[in-house]
Image: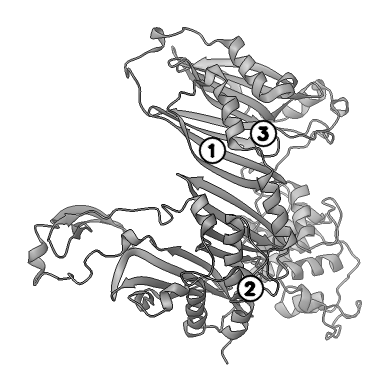
Amino acid sequence: MKKFVSVLLVLIMALSAFPVLADTAVEDALLKVKAKLSVPEELSEFSYSENKYDDVLRYDFTWHTEDYTKELYVSTDSRGRIVTYNYYEQMDYTGERTLIDYTLADARPLAEETVKTMFPEYFVEGADKLVLNEAKTTSSYSGRYKSFFFTFDREFVETKVESNRVNVRVRATKDKMYLQSVTASLDEDEAFIPVNPHALKLADTPEDYEEKFPITIYYATDYSEDEPKVKLFYSIDKGYVQSDTGEIITQEYFDRYAGITEDSAADMEMGTGGTFSKNEAMLSPKEQGEIEKMESLVKPEEVEKMLRGLALLKITDDMKFTESYTYGRDDNYFVSFSLVGEKRYMNVTYNGETGEVTNISSHFTKYDDSEKKISDSNSSAPEDEIKTFTKTLAGDKFDETKAEFNTQNERSTLTATRIVNDVPFPENSISVTYDMVNNVITRYSLYWDEDTTDFPNPDAAMGLDRAREIIFENDIDMVWVKQTEGYVGAITIPESVIINAITGEKPYRYDEEKTVYTDIENHWAKDAINVLFEHDIYLPGDTFKPNDAITQADMIYLFSACRESGIIPLSWTKERIAEYGFTNGYVEATEPDKLMTRREAFKAMVEILGHGSIAEFDIYKSSYSDMEENGSAEILKAMGVLTGDTARPDDFLTRAEAAVMVYRYLAKE
């Protein structure tokens, strides 16, 4: 039995045991999805969002684990027809490359069974079918997994339906194979059935099409060779000629869900057209709870009514509600909707639970007078009215800001920066843009964090005098700066400088120019340190301090060069490096300045190389006279990273020793 069988049992065709009566369109759609697909029990979290365009509803359902290491996403129309399926499972990208035993032949049955399960109506007796396109069956290899790609073309009377297909991707790792994604583009409205399917007739010779599809000649650069070259090409554009009349036609694209309204979908009975009955699946408490939350949100009509009452928005009667989209983010629900008119369209986003507007953007599509200038209208923005408008939408939040106007390019922008503890907090702000030509507000945005209790007390900051000393420790240069009258000399600091107001430390390492170390000329590790330096593996500064004990952050930074993905960015702070090491299990705590023992360093390097679990096996005998059995040390010795008969496990690892360990690993054959 092939390996795919176990995967099919997990992912395909699990029916629920207890019936429930669905009362809404979204419940009907979700029940149909669950009738066709099984949701693994470990994906215990559920959420859904919906969007609406021209009265056409679409639903997005998501199941995931609490830590988001696994996630299943399914998008459907309001009938429950699957449009997109995607399964995500977090992978470990730190290990070494490995071969994958699964083949296309193994993956094909899973792809075929998936399509039959998701789209059963195309696998009954009839002229409308989904057929595997053998020419588009491919695979790719990344080093840690394989991906298999399958395309099922829709055929009517054994003839391909253009732009109608189902794409399936199967992923295989060393240990398992599973369905990764499905995307469907199927025009299921009856208007897409060929009007005269038996009138198919090809011309006798290609020359018969020359007039319909003229060939063109042109130059273009060919990048397929080692050196790009300009070459001469012939081209024929894709087009369509009606087979029975010979007329040139253009493919028209319709929304595959057109005509399916919320009301009509709710009235449809499950169990018709090859679908499943209502009694085959049920909603979990989590799913039902999410649906109830969504139903309790502030309706777009309420927000629209409020906005129409704001004069500076100038929402005209011809601007009509066209679409909405509801989604969850950071434990909040947001709703977006659009108002479209003859000359303008407006997009609005608001907090679905409170009704607070967070974003407005308005655009003109037509102008009464394209030559209209600022001089034809008001010469200045009505600042008091703009502030009143902002206060209406932002409420008390506006009182917590410092507001400033900036006018240029026929627009006036109000930027209100939040003030916390008498200190500006630019990440929280309110912005309003006023079009001075058309006398209308075109943009409004609100970015706000509700909780500021963890903000540092400004009383703990160092004084300005000390801050100046730290900042001006950098070189000061004279530069020429271009002005209207010409270039003028100016004094400048070569780079922007940011420091922590309390500690004086820079928030990130600067990618300073590499300088040759001045303290390793006669050191035993000189050659190794210099080779790493030539490969951009180095610690900043003009001295390496080879005999100093290495800190946790610097050790992790150097050892990261041994990863397949390469060294971590030099711009990371030591705190971020140490946190990265702790999160990935390289070290047992985040202590960037801690001096590392050799024993701790052995374990960290083996973990970075991805062999930590192997090092824990009780299979090792000590080859050192001064250390008991240690899997990490024995693995590194087998690799040639460690040498000698003594390990000195409790000594601190020096910076030179850390560099030599990295050099030996990268230099091994």
CB within 8 Å, label 3 to label 2: no
Residue that carries the numbered disc 2 in the rendered image: 96
Image height check: is 580 above or below 203?
above
Distance between mark 3 and mark 2 Cα atoms: 50 Å
Image height check: is 262 above or below 625?
above
For label 2, the crowd category at 10 Å Cα-Cα, with few meaning under 14, some 14 to 19 and many 20 or more, is: some
Horizontal arrangement in the rendering, residue 424 relative to residue 131 (left or right): right
Distance between mark 1 and mark 3 Cα atoms: 13 Å
Looking at the rendered structure, the secondary structure element under dot 3 is loop
Image height check: is 647 above or below 537?
below
Q: Quadrant of residue 372?
A: top left
Q: Nearer the viewer, mark 1 or mark 2?
A: 1
Looking at the rendered structure, the secondary structure element under dot 1 is strand
Residue that carries the numbered disc 3 in the rendered image: 355
Counting residues from the start of the chain, the first of labels 1 and 3 encountered is 1
x, y percent for residue 511 = 63, 44
Q: Quadrant of residue 658?
A: bottom right
x, y percent for residue 115 = 48, 74
Looking at the rendered structure, the secondary structure element under dot 2 is loop
Horizontal arrangement in the rendering, residue 657 relative to residue 29 (left or right): right
Please tell me which residue is depicted at 51% across the width and 46% down the height of the picture. Answer: 52
